Image (cartoon, helix red, strand yellow):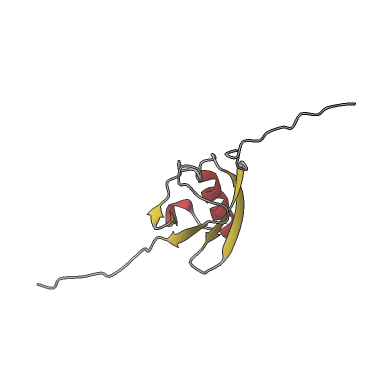
Amino acid sequence: MWIVPEVAVPLNDAPEHINLKVLGQDNAVVQFKIKKHTPLKKLMNAYCERTGLAMATVRFRFDGQAISEADTPSSLEMEEGDTIEVYQQQTGGCFYFNYY
């Protein structure tokens, strides 16, 4: 007779990967699976490549806060299925010429 001890798994051993959604200004959603401790720069670059946007022309935000390339899902306390919003930088604007 064999006795197999139970293997206890700590409750705080959450999955290493997380699924995140990236929402563009056109309301198109792109989903990514990323490790919780991977810098979000990897996701940001992949999103820009997939959508044909230049990294220098977009800003990423989570819960209203700007995301830096060094941030990780873990550092921002992201949870499964959270959404990152992408905004294109506005270029141009009003030109004012003073005739006086």
Near-viewer residue (32 or 87): 32
Q: Quadrant of the N terminus?
A: top right
Q: In the image, 32: left or right of 60?
A: right
Q: In the image, 91: left or right of 13?
A: left
Q: Position of residue 13 (x, y in %)?
A: 60, 38
Which image quarter: residue 16? top right
Residue under the point 60% across and 42% down: 14
Near-viewer residue (4 or 61): 4
Residue under the point 54% across and 54% down: 48
Q: Position of residue 62 (x, y in %)?
A: 44, 55
Near-viewer residue (56 or 76): 76
Which image quarter: residue 50? bottom right
Q: Quadrant of the C terminus?
A: bottom left
Q: Position of residue 64 (x, y in %)?
A: 39, 58
Residue ranking furthest to the bottom: 99
Q: In the image, 15: left or right of 77?
A: right
Near-viewer residue (100 or 56): 56
Residue under the point 19% across and 70% down: 97
Which image quarter: residue 21? bottom right
Residue under the point 43% across and 61% down: 88
Vertical relation: 75 (above or below) 86:
above
Residue ranking furthest to the left: 100
